[in-house]
Amino acid sequence: MHTIRYFLGRLCGAVPTLFAIITITFFLVRAAPGGPFDQEQTLPADVVANLNAAYGLDRPVWVQYTRYLWGLAHFDFGPSFRYKDFTVTELIAQGLPVSFTLGAIAISIALVAGVAIGTFAALRRGRAADHVSMAIAAIGIAIPSFVLLPALGLFFGIYLHWLPVAGWDEGSIADLVLPVITLSLPPLAYIARLTRGSMLEVLGSAYIRTATAKGLPLGTVVLRHALRPALVPVASYMAPAVAMVMTGSLVVETIAGLPGIGRYLVQGALNRDYTLVLGMVIVYSSLLICMGLVADLLIAMLDPRVRLEA
Amino acid sequence: MNDHGLQPSACRRLLANRAALIALATILALIALAIVGPYVNPNRYDTLDWANIAMPPGLRHAHWFGTDRLGRDLFVRTLQGTRLSLAIGSIATAVSLAVGIVYGAVAGFVGGRIDHLMVRVIEILSGLPLIFFVIFLTVVFGRNIFLLFFAIGAVSWLNMARIVRGQAMVLRGREFIEAAIAAGAGPARIIFRHIVPNVIGPVIVYATLTVPQIILFESFLSFLGLGVQEPRASLGTLIAQGAAEMESAPWMLLVPGAVLAVLLISFNVLGDALRDALDVKRN
């Protein structure tokens, strides 16, 4: 009951944040020079005027703003200005499953492998395995996705012919392997480091000494007693991890030619496709806000001392 | 806390860390190469050598790292890009430091409702995908490199502000601040003379970790075609061109990619080592 009330309170608290983000973005995109209809070929002035009138762009900005908000209140993201005959909702609905699948797999791999490697490194503290995994983690954090993905494509695609370099064949697994590896590596490396650090702290605590002293095998000590508290920092890292994967997906989807939503953000901003940019910002921001909420709930589950207070 | 942060013991701890020393040496070497390198090689970054197009690395015509599709020398272009990355990294970090320190110190020291509001602003800004912000700024500023530096710095101060705020809140309750208030010092004096000097440890650490983030950011933008424009080279644009040609000319991808990776890894390793040496809590 308490958790549900907390959950609802936080959701209500997110509304003003989201509202502020939408407002800032709305006026920022409008403030940029140029409009959605002045691109490569210059259109006749009256055509542009008609287009502006058709999309309501001839009205004062605050009228456009209230109209947009009114549409949003009905879950209408408006029409895309550049992808003719498509609404922003349709564009996002087409791409989101691809991006979501990619991101969800990448985050899951990062979590499982990161926690496993971090725990392993903590148990082998100061030995070769620890140094090797932390060195790899340092590299994994630093190496950018737009270097890693082409390099992986070069070796596994062009030299070894194991995997396709790019492309999308109705979501065949082979197409996803390299993009998923690229996306998951930075959060994986980060999670491994976080887990190692917190695991070392937990393993040094008195109740772990007690558990070991009463003769529990190492596996039980780690899995039953140490893992849960050690996961708290990892849980609080979930929102930044998702943000990292989102940013990565902008590049990875472009390089690998995947039909996700990553490309819309950059293209939308360049094309002054106001509604598309706003729609993307709303999707990304909502996801980030939700991840922050999920992270706090996870922390409360993992650590009974944490009290949820809205 | 970090009152003892800059004592000689921190220096000793840093010097004892071999990985950190290697990283520091690598960074210094790359800086020196980026400054001097282009003058050592007879080729220029924008000369088109039509007789030697897409040449693999070698010694002929001093194209040590090979040439690109237009016959431009990759050694010079890569170092040119490195120089640009380092310049962007340091300028934007300076901007983010200045904004972050002042913002964080004011929020943490003043406290109360103003602090609440300022934290809320940070929260909202962190909710935005920052990459969008910078994309927008590059579009508005017409891809002027120096404004790009500024824009990146202006959006990457959030973490710094959070850290400084946390430190300032701790410091606010300390006796020497009370003494300063009792002696009649105004808030501005307390913030700049008493709070800012005391957060210098974490600030150094996060500055070292901000530089690679910004270099990464700039290369990312240039990779997307939003940053540095031709004929100037940035590591990001070189990697984008290399990725398009990797089948026939893999060195075009591997040379700038390796330099960028080494640069980023070195800064991260150095930053981590500084954090350990100065004993700054992980945030």
Image (tube, rainbow, N blue to C red):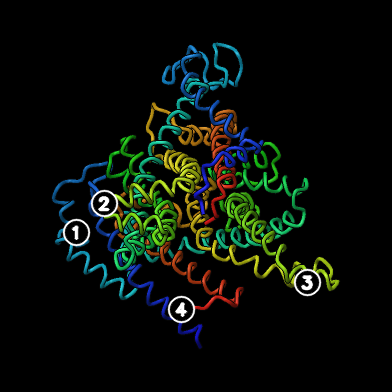
Question: Which of the chains bears the disc numbered 4?
Answer: A
- Left or right: A233 with respect to A78? right
The chain holding disc 1 is A
Q: Is mark 2 on a helix, strand or loop?
A: loop
Q: Are marks 3 and 2 on the same chain?
A: yes
Give the alpha-carbon distance from disc 1 to disc 4, as whole Å: 44 Å
Q: Position of residue B149 (x, y in %)?
A: 36, 39
Front of the two marks 3 and 2: 3
Q: Which of marks 3 and 4 is nearer the N terminus?
A: 3
Looking at marks 4 and 2 on the same chain, the residue that comes earlier in the sequence is marked by 2
In the depicted structure, whether residue A129 falls above or below residue A53: above
Q: Residue at label 3?
A: A210
Q: Mark 3 and mark 4: span between their CA atoms?
A: 33 Å
**Sequence-first disc among 1 and 3:** 1
Q: Residue at x 61, y 17 (%)?
A: B58
Please report contact status of discs 1 and 3: CB closer than 8 Å, yes or no. Answer: no
Amino acid beneath label 4:
Glu
Please give left or right for residue B250 compared with residue B208 in the image. right
| Residue A130 visible in rendering | yes
Q: Nearer the viewer, mark 1 or mark 4?
A: 4
Which of labels 1 and 3 is toward the front?
3
Residue designated by label 4 = A309
Alpha-carbon span between mark 4 and mark 2:
45 Å
Identify residue for label 2.
A36
Q: Earlier in the sequence, mark 3 or mark 2?
A: 2
Residue picked out by circle 1: A57
Q: Which of marks 1 and 4 is nearer the N terminus?
A: 1
Subunit that carries the residue with mark 2? A
Image marks 1 and 2: residues in contact by CB distance under 8 Å: yes
Q: Judging from the image, what secondary structure is the residue with disc 4 in?
A: loop
Q: Which of marks 4 and 2 is in front?
A: 4
